[in-house]
Image (cartoon, rainbow, N blue to C red):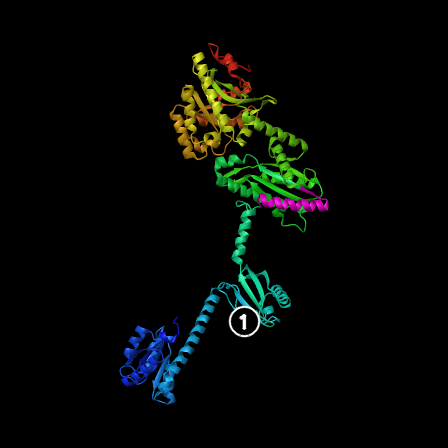
Amino acid sequence: MGRNYCNGDDLILIVDDDPTLRMMARTTLEKSGFRVEEAEDGEQALRKFIQHQPSVIMLDVEMPKLNGYETCKRIREDAIGAHIPVLITTGLEDIESLNHAFSAGATDFLPKPIDWALIPHRVRHILRANRTYYELRTSEAKNNALLNAMPDTLFVIRRNGDIVNFLAGNEAASLPEPRGDQLNIKDYLPDNVARYWFNCMQKVISQGSAQQSEFSLDHDNQQNHYELQMVPYLNDLTLAIVREITNRKRSEEEVHRLAYFDMLTGLPNRQLFRQQLADAIEFASQNGTKVAALYVDLDNFKRINDTLGHSFGDVVLKTIANRLDNCIRADDCITRADTEEPGMRLARLGGDEFVVLLQDLESEEEAVAVAERIRTELTQPVEHLGHEFVVTSSIGVSLYPRDGDNIDTLLKNADVAMYQAKNAGRNSVRFYSGTMSLRSLERLELENGLRYAIQRNELKVHYQPKIDLGSGEFAGVEALLRWHHPEHGNIPPSDFIPMAEECGLISLLGEWVLRNACQQVKTWQDLYKRRINVAVNVSSQQFFNTDFADAVLREIFDTGLDPCNLQLELTETILMNDVKETIATLNKLKKAGISLAMDDFGTGYSSLSYLNRLPVDTLKIDRLFVMDLETNRENAAICAAIIAMAHALDLKVVAEGVETEGQKNYLRNQRCDQIQGFLISKPLPPETLANAFLSNAKNPALIRNT
């Protein structure tokens, strides 16, 4: 009701069909400070009850229309009227009438004739009792609301473990109420948890201070986690407050997983691996054993992503991760009884880089065996969505304490050894040696030198001629980049081109070659008054710049070269990545008159299915198929098939790497259109090529190395 119970605020509703009694009651109560309302029958009483909501109702039993019993009953049916004191006045003195009054909901009764002097005291007593009841009910409601809102489950426990009281919180679905045969915690809880609770209780009782900890219970085939707080209660009683924290624990586990594990493969990440390696080094230093770090990098993995897409690449990475994990689990000789599970010794550092930790080694041979088994296992074909291919690996190994006594040094030296394995031809294992650091330093110096090579005028474009096999005449040139380092001399393209791709310089170099080649050919055309075609290689990084077509057209415009004299040589990785956008870019170039060639044809994955969709003019047969076609029937058949297929699609064919008369004659018999290679000429500086191939009135046929 929420009412203040001071006399001036209390309203008494007097209900009686006798006006004299109503007048007497009003006079008596108003003199005592009460406010009064009157009703002459039950129906009027109900209306005034709703209108005024009195503090007390004095209700006569015998009334017309609606007697006192029925009126009281209807008042009690109302939510507010359920708690208003009702004082029934009756002249009846039999027990049956009193029972009837109380059954209808009366609070008390006044027998007639009424002692008017006692009425104010009787009303105050009823009000005081009702106020006390109201406050108690309000307090109980508040307590119940608080308890119902609490997530905690409460246990009151005796020293001997008896559960005196139990109150389930609103999140206690996994903690059932103790049954009759579970009124002691040793019967209610599993043995190990019950012993734990007893220990906590003994500390609470002996020390008089709260104890807080956590425990777990199995429920519905899953493990639930709880927070336990025990505090002193009364005498030998202890209050145990239990809160379920399963969701919090799972959130903490998820945060830990995100922080320390790789999302794609589920393997430990770099951060967790560094912790594991630190522990392994500490153990090895105390026990005089060895630790090996194996740095595993997949060979040419970028080509898979570029050709088949990153989703396909992700499947391959997960397959490789499973194979690596199985390799390590199979090696019992490197697993100590007190270590974590073997799978925790493998981590993914990012991209296609993995690292393996071998701990507690007695000899280097154990690491050799594991590294070689990993290398062999990864050469097994990977199959997915109808594709089958081999992903080899380059593995570098460093050993503690020989190759370093800390995390960073061991990982750095394993990385150095891995790059040495790549430089040795890939699909190999290399152990770190001190000389590798010198070579790595040289590589770093070369990379830095490459960044300034253009500014220092160290780069040159050489040109390798192409010959028409039908006429034997000069058919154009391919522009090839060369680097003459002031200290290291001529750096092979096979060394600095991959380096430029790794450090993001390849686009800059590609644009520089394109500009110089266009300028050179335009100079030759103006000087010798003849048409000269030039082919320029395009890297995937350069091609996928958003303005590639515009950049090419701008170079042509700036140099004045006829677009029909330029051919762009594209790799299959370019032509199969985002085909729709690629075709749009190629069509823009083709519309301008630029010729397009597919370079290194036959070394990719799915070239044939795209040929009739791509606006290419020329296929270039990779030198791998040409170099031994005189002795390798399979390669000879591949060359013949490529030539026949290209001609069926109205494409020209250029064979690279032609070095012998036998190769030339075979290709001529298969009607290959053009050839280039050392049989004709090595790549030449501009002035040398001009003297050999452009200055004569007639084109020399098949000039050898000049």
| Quarter placement of the N terminus | bottom left
For residue 26, above or below residue 588: below
| Quarter placement of the C terminus | top right
Residue at the disc numbered 1 = 165
Q: Name which residue lies at 47% across and 66% down.
A: 146
Looking at the rendered structure, the number of numbered marks drawn on it comes to 1
First to last magenta residue range:
268-291
Q: Which kind of residue does numbered mark 1 sit on?
A: Asn
Query: Is residue 605 at all visible to an observer of this figure?
Result: yes
* Secondary element at tag 1: strand
- Magenta span main SS: helix
Closer-to-camera residue (667/383): 383
Residue sticking out furthest to the front: 31
Q: Name which residue lies at 62% across and 68% down.
A: 205
Q: Where is residue 455 drawn, in percent x and y?
A: 53, 23
Closer-to-camera residue (353/668): 353
Q: Where is residue 620 drawn, in percent x and y?
A: 48, 25
Q: Where is residue 552 drawn, in percent x and y?
A: 43, 25
